[in-house]
Amino acid sequence: MRPRRSATRDDGIRGVPQGAVRPVGHRHRAYRHVAGGIRAAVSRGAVGPPGDPLAVPALERFPPSARRVLVTGASGFVGANLCRWLLRDGHSVHAVVRPGTDTWRIEEIRGDITLHRLELRDAEAVRTTIGAVRADWLFHLAAHGAYSRQTDTAAIFATNTDATAGLVDLAGAGAFEAFVQAGSTAEYGFKDHPARESEPVAPLGSYAISKAAATRYARTVSMERGAHIVTLRLSTAYGPWEDPYRLMPALAMFGLRRRLPPLTDPKTVRDFVFVDDVCEAFVRAARATHLKHGSIFNIGSGTPTSLAELVDLARGELAIDEQPRWSTMAPRTWDTMLCVADCARSRRRLGWRPSRGLAEGFRALVDWLERNSRARARYARSMGIPLG
């Protein structure tokens, strides 16, 4: 049952008392002031159905209905795809992007969404926007440091940890029916086996550490306040609108010209998951109010794929005769790690599993590039590939 909307205070957020939101930098304490109406709203989430509700697929138990949804990081790869997914489902989409951000991924849907240019580190601006939107669900995908060019440590922690903590605090106070954030399998660190959610994390590097801290804080607030807060630790997502400098778009774009891009170590292993499957996981997590508070789920294929295997697949799909030139691209610090997720919990408790295998997903990416001339031209310019 959806919680009844409480009256909106002068500060604009339903059920959140004036002054309850502390500055986002003070992330090490849980909320101290929660309105009585919020206590009632969150307490209803602690009561599950009889039997074993955690094993029941969320989308089967809760039929779709329209929601007002706020998506942070909406101009990013996963965020732009999620906005489209939500629109197709009939939801009202409010997209948050950082001021000055290039919104090329969402230009074609600008007329279908409400765009908010918002700095998430500005606590007052965040509070005002959330109060005005009155979203049912918040999908938090804004992040910094996932790309090798994003090296500013202060910006990484300010965005991934501090700004996230501010949003989690609002979720803990009952501002949303559901708060689902994007974590990362990088939080696990180096593993010699598929990582499970129950394992201790050992993040390496600023990005992974900042994401692990955000996950820990979200879990703590959810358990203390009874709020529906879920973290999805994403494996290597790929598909339409991915960053032009990433491996999959490079393989597809070069492959369309029967060539191969520069490559790193062929033994590098990844767990690839198609972006549409990631979007489905977010929606399932939002609807799955039967989950334990502070739930964490791995979202991936669960299948290790080496770079050598991926290149073989691309050569076969696109009839590429050129031989791979290994180690012609400098390795990143994480390129030697086995990065595979154990997704049994997601199957069992969310009823989620990827619908596309790697070959089908790669073909879908190629087909999208062939249909989308503007995106193809942008990718070609970024990669230095002639358009002829």
Image (cartoon, rainbow, N blue to C red):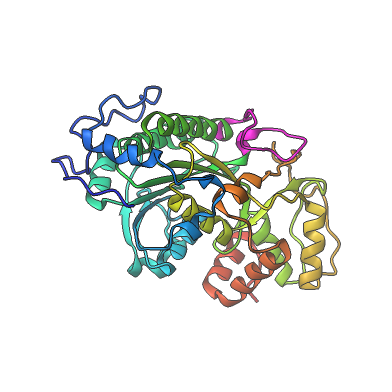
Between residue 3 and residue 355, name the one nearer to us: 3
Q: Residue at x 54, y 52 (%)?
A: 56
Q: Quadrant of residue 262?
A: bottom right
User: Is 126 located above or below residue 356 in the figure?
Assistant: above
**Direction from residue 385 to residue 13 in the image, left or right:** left
Viewer-nearest residue: 103 or 136: 136
Left or right: 80, with 322 as reference point = left
Which percent across, then down, holds residue 39?
A: 28, 34
Q: Position of residue 76 (x, y in %)?
A: 48, 54
Position above or below: 353 against 88: above
Point 71% across, 44% down: residue: 340
Determine whether 294 is above or below 318 in the image: above
Q: Residue furthest front?
A: 50
- Say if 256 sits above or below 278 in the image: below
**Which residue is rendered at x = 64% and y = 34% of the image?**
188
Give the main secondary structure of the magenta stretch.
Answer: loop
Asked if residue 188 is among those painted magenta in the image, a careful observer would answer yes
How far across and down, in percent of the image, does residue 250 sit? 67, 60
- The part of the chain drawn in magenta is 186-207
Q: Is residue 140 visible?
A: yes
Residue 28: say if magenta: no
Residue 176 placement (x, y as % from top left): 33, 45
Q: Is residue 242 visible?
A: no
Is 270 on the left-hand or right-hand side of 65? right
Q: Is residue 378 left or right of residue 74?
A: right
Q: Quadrant of the C terminus?
A: bottom right
In which quadrant of the rendered view does residue 119 lie? top left
Q: How many marks?
A: 0
